[in-house]
Amino acid sequence: MQPAYNSYSAYIRNAFGERVQKISINTGYSCPNRDGTKGLGGCTYCNINSIKPDYANAKKSVTEQLKEGIDFFSKKHTSLKYLAYFQSYTNTYSNNEELIRTYEEALSFPDVMGLVIGTRPDCISKEIIEYLHQISKTKYVSVELGIESTNDLTLQKINRCHTYAETIDAVELLAKNNLLVGGHLILGFPWESRSDLIAHAQKVSLLPLKFLKIHHLQILEHTQLAKEYKLNKEAFSFYDLQEYLLLIIEFLENLRPDIVVQRFISESPKALLLAPHWKGVKNYQFATLVEQKLKELNTWQGRLA
Ligand code: SF4
């Protein structure tokens, strides 16, 4: 029987035949939306400290971070392979020579099978795309883009400093170069209606995306959104867990069936989280709820796509 949604764990099993763990690396490259090149202050929801494990520290070399990350995970699981995950900030935001040196350092580490590079749609040069294209002939290479919304008004409101048209161009260019492209979306900005959110599924289904990571909106300390929230809580409304589950079911029904869904919810540290509070539910627990609900409703990813 076909699974009701296209999960990342099934994708990894099929692609590698074994468990593969991503090891987060912090390059400290910062981001053009923080240093004034594109914008100042960053995206309104972004607290960069929400996604860094302890070992991912830009003061350490890529090799040291990989070693510490692999030591950490090899205590939990045996016979693992790894992907170097350039996660924090914008990991194509440096000169080409430095970027290539960094990627090569990661690729030369034993048992690292490839790269996952997180970046912005407006910050990746043709030269780096060509380099990654060459690497992808022998190694796994995926590029994750912050899409966040398909709605330009939202992109403006959250200070992304790029448009959805730039996302479309970047995804198409990367895919044309045989790179596996992932996208991140945030669901739940208070001014986006439910039909706006379902439209995101329909619009990203038109892109040559391989992966999608869905995040529910979380208000995190030390962000512009936190300031706005503290000033006017009434302007914000949040899905509760059950409502969000039903939203995700409808979202999946409208999503192209071959897109691999890597996550459904965010998991920011409790100490930074202002709202919403879902009792610390983890993504893998939420994924189980999604599977159960799809079964109960006899529906599946792509049913309406
Ligand atoms: S979300 Fe990404 S692009 Fe936006 S401020 Fe944070 S690191 Fe920069």
Image (tube, grey):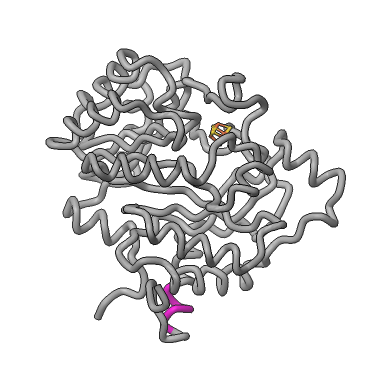
Q: Where is residue 29 in the image (x, y as percent from the top left)?
A: 47, 20
Q: Is-magenta flag for residue 117? A: no
Q: Position of residue 180 (x, y in %)?
A: 28, 45
**Extreme left residue here?**
138
| Residue pictured at 21% horizontal, 44% vertical | 79
Identify the image quadrant of the C terminus: bottom left
Picture quarter containing residue 216? bottom right
Q: Quadrant of ligand 1?
A: top right
| Residue pictured at 33% horizontal, 38% vertical | 116
Magenta stretch, main secondary structure, is helix
Using residue 225 as the reference point, say whether residue 81 is left or right of it. Answer: left
In the image, 139 versus 97, the foreground residue is 97
Q: Please count the marks in the image.
A: 0
Q: Is-magenta flag for residue 292? A: yes
| Residue pictured at 59% horizontal, 19% vertical | 35
Q: Where is residue 268 in the image (x, y as percent from the top left)?
A: 59, 45
Q: What range is drawn magenta here? A: 291-295
Using residue 249 as the reference point, say whether residue 84 is left or right of it. Answer: left
Q: Position of residue 110 (x, y in %)?
A: 19, 28
Identify the image quadrant of the N terminus: bottom left
Is 257 placed above or below 103 here? below
| Residue pictured at 87% horizontal, 44% vertical | 231
